[in-house]
């Protein structure tokens, strides 16, 4: 199984990643860099290879799709 990205992972912290976005209009599920399947709760992200991010998460690399 692919592990979830931890908020205290150094790369995650560098980009201020959180599992729960502070802005309801900006979620990982609406980011150009998200991968995997629509509707999955945890999905791969191009910025964090080898980890899954929360569909409701956010980081400072957010790019609106
Ligand atoms: Fe989420 Fe950031 Fe990955 Fe976009 S780049 S899917 S906001 S973790």
Image (spheres, grey):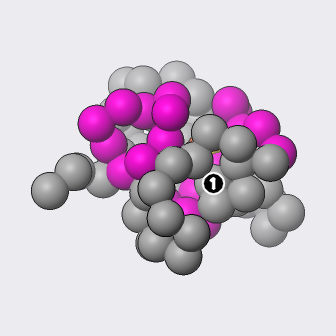
Tell me if residue 20 can be seen.
Answer: no
Identify the residue at image location x=32%, y=43%: 51
Identify the residue at image location x=28%, y=36%: 50
**Front position in the image: 6 or 46:** 46
Pinpoint residue 1: horizontal percent, then vertical percent: 14, 56
Identify the residue at image location x=77%, y=38%: 63
> Looking at the magenta stretch, what is its main secondary structure?
loop
Identify the residue at image location x=42%, y=48%: 44
Please tell me in which quarter of the rendered image ligand 1 is found: top right
Q: Is residue 49 magenta?
A: yes
Q: Ligand 1 closer than 8 Å to the CB at disc 1?
A: yes
In the image: residue 28, left or right of residue 4:
right
Up the image or down, 59 lies above or below 42; here it is above
In the image: residue 41, left or right of residue 32:
left
Marker count (numbered) = 1
Query: Which residue is under mark 1?
Result: 28
Say what secondary structure mark 1 lies in: helix
Boundaries of the magenta span: 44-64
Label 1: few (<14), some or many (≥20) within 10 Å?
Answer: many
Pinpoint residue 35: horizontal percent, then vertical percent: 51, 49
Up the image or down, 37 lies above or below 6; here it is below
């Amino acid at each position: 199984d692919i592990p979830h990205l931890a908020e205290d992972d150094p790369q995650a912290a560098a980009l201020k990643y959180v599992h729960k976005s502070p802005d309801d209009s900006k979620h990982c599920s609406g980011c150009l860099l998200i991968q995997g399947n629509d509707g999955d709760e945890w999905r791969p992200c191009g910025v964090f290879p080898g980890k899954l991010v929360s569909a409701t998460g956010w980081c400072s690399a957010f790019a609106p799709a």
